[in-house]
Amino acid sequence: MKKKHRTQERKREGERERERERERRERERERERVCCEMGLLSVGTPLPWEQARKHAPHVRKHGIAQLTNIWRRLKDRKRDRLYWGDEIEYTVVRFDEGSKIATVSLDAHDTLEILENLEKAALQSGNPFPSSWKPEYGRYMLEGTPGQPYGSTLNDLLTVEPNMRDRRKLAQSYLPKGDAVVTITSFPRLGCPGFAGPSAKPTPNDGCSHSIFVSNDAINPHPRFRTLTANIRERRGAKVAINMPIYKDVNTPDPFLERLPPSLEDPTVNMDAVISESNFSCPGLALKEAKSDRSSTLTLPEVIPDALPNHIYMDCMCFGMGCSCLQVTFQACSVEEARRLYDQLAVVTPIMLALSAAAPIFRGYLADVDCRWNVISGSVDDRTREEQSILPLKTSTFQIPKSRYASVSTYLSPGPSNLGCNSALDEYGSGEAKPPKGNFWKPKYNDIPLVQDQEIFRELVANDMDEYLARHYAHLFIRDPLVIFEELLSVDDTTSSDHFENIQSTNWQTMRFKPPPPNSSIGWRVEFRSMEIQLTDFENAAFAVFVVLLTRTILSFDLNLYIPLSKVDENMSSAHHRDAVLKDKFYFRRNIFGDSAKEGAVAESGSESSDVDQDAFDQMTVDEIMNGSKKPPSNGGPTSSSERNFPGLIPLIRSYLATSPIPAATQIKLSSYLDLISHRASGALPTAAKWMRSFVMRHPAYKHDSVVSDEINFDLVRAVAELGNAEGPVAGLSSL
């Protein structure tokens, strides 16, 4: 009896010790997470491009060495829990009640310093801080994340919305009177005269951007951001050029041709320099007249070769990186699971972009697009004319078809073994080694020609990395490092990943595959990056939770979403269209069940018989992809490709939740999030982009000429701020 008692006591003590160790590791994980996130913003001496370019081979070489060190040590790491977090980028706006003008607040940087100091003091005293705050590109922006990663259980998902709400309230509490925190993808009049407060004028011949619309004062003063801006422009050999199609309303001029902005009316501005920074050669049509008469009726397309007729022209990084988005990062239990989720979620990124569309206005004009992605892509496009294939290769090494900010260009495959663990099988993430029933990967899915550095590819393969993952990194490393701090040139490749992250973190793709930091308890992670920020905390929580639930459903039901990657690119293009969520169709796989036995768990799924191409895909509406479709055969005959049933991602997630032992309150709350996504997909609820566009077009001051005036902007941004203060769903926007 005593022996049995001692055995039970040892068992209980062992359990207590394991719990203490788990808590210790979580505290260590959080400290490391904060340090890793802040590492990319280390303060030092950033090198101008002419110096930085000389060190690019050094950074690239040591970045690959750091990656191979991580790979050799941690490729077999398994059984990590699901930890995850969201990232929200806030815009701080200022309301002038007297003039009825809303601007972005450049004083937001002062609030950021207060929040950073509060977090730092809490961590130094050993106390957790509920949120974490970092600089973002715009001086008027704040980046907020949860202070600690969310837990691995379904019940933990209920903490997301309260955490987002508390973040907003905390930031708001340290703002001066008249300023407000809003979650808006793109400030509607960014780049218009007087868009910022305190007022700051652009300097077309000076500073880091040389923009004719945006002052350098709108950029965060951290040396990384301004050096990044200047080095992109200098590496490219021209300013960035962004053109979004104008929305043609009944009174919109046709053709739409803007007059020169006020900054070019200044006689001290060197027009030769302004024009020479265009990506395309100047036709010289109106240069002489522009020099002699700055107040003439000349239009932008006549003077600036990059400015296209019938488009909204933007010329600097702030138009893109000054936008806000919602990103979700989660830890997988193994590298194999991370790779699998990377591939499967890559297919979904365009669908989620269309569903979260929230950017219908740029530089004070209604655009004929609903999303910000292409604006950001253009804003950081550092490719030279040779790399863009405008000129034949002479001094550049590669012709590169995409910007650094783009959709993924290669699937990773689950890896050669396809083993590992499956964190969806255990709510608490113990990660037993239960691989999926089948390896769905086929090389034919990678049907996009991939530009890669062959020398780097061979080095990675020689260090025991499989060819598909090696191709991914050999592709990322065709890029140059854009910001190099002099103090970080020489680091220990066995303990540092600075050079690797320098290039990895400036490849801004729809998905990001993130290896563990050196000497860290953090595991293999995947970041979902395509979604736009939503107007309320309820919506942002719903979209973040949806992505996490989708990962659990993919793993639990062994789903196979693979389609040719070229079709994912086509979907990405379609997602930008106005009202794409209702008007466009997207390529999606017909039979998504990798394990037919699990198909029965979700009732009638409509999977294909064995004599049908199991890799077939159709063009479906977002409603069909999300909510499913059940179409009976015509006249009792065979089912055509346009009539086949599709289960829908949301019904599959609901089936996953129905099999999970969770309290009724959790089930109800998660169901409300799924309802929002479902109603967006069906059109029962509008996207944020449609809501904003409708607000403008119904405004009494709108002249149906595509112009979003200061008066309209004030009322729109005021309405967005009021929505942001709402708790829970808002009727007509996030609930029926």
Image (cartoon, rainbow, N blue to C red):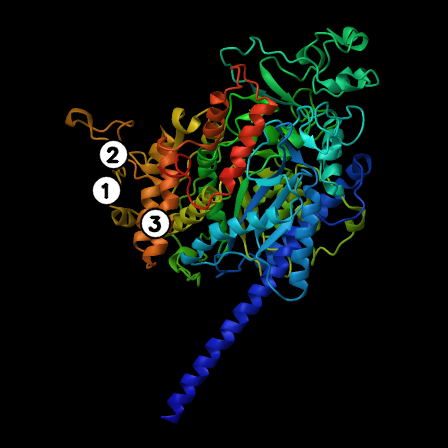
Name the N-terminal-most of marks 2 and 1. Answer: 1
Q: Name the residue carrying label 2.
A: 630
Q: Name the residue carrying label 3.
A: 557
Q: Residue furthest left?
A: 636
Identify residue type, mark 3.
Answer: Phe
Out of 226 and 166, give the one closest to the viewer. 166
Name the N-terminal-most of marks 1 and 3. Answer: 3
Identify residue type, mark 2.
Answer: Lys
Query: Residue 543 vs residue 625: left or right?
Result: right
Out of 46 and 259, give the one closest to the viewer. 259
Residue count near mark 1 (Cα–Cα under 10 Å), binned few <14, some 14–19, many ≥20 = few
Q: Position of residue 492 (x, y in %)?
A: 74, 56
Query: Residue 428 vs residue 374: left or right?
Result: left
Q: Are marks 1 and 3 in contact (CB under 8 Å)?
A: no
Point out the image quarter for the N terminus. bottom left
Residue 582 in view of the camera: yes
Q: Position of residue 488 (x, y in %)?
A: 77, 50
Secondary element at tag 1: loop
Q: Are marks 2 and 3 in contact (CB under 8 Å)?
A: no
Identify residue type, mark 1.
Answer: Glu
Q: Cα distance, mark 2 to mark 1?
A: 9 Å
Q: Quadrant of residue 201?
A: top right
Q: Name the residue carrying label 1.
A: 604
Q: Cα distance, mark 2 to mark 3?
A: 20 Å
Out of 39 and 75, give the one closest to the viewer. 39
Point out the image quarter for the C terminus. top left
Residue count near mark 2 (Cα–Cα under 10 Å), binned few <14, some 14–19, many ≥20 = some
Q: Are marks 2 and 1 in contact (CB under 8 Å)?
A: yes
Secondary element at tag 3: loop
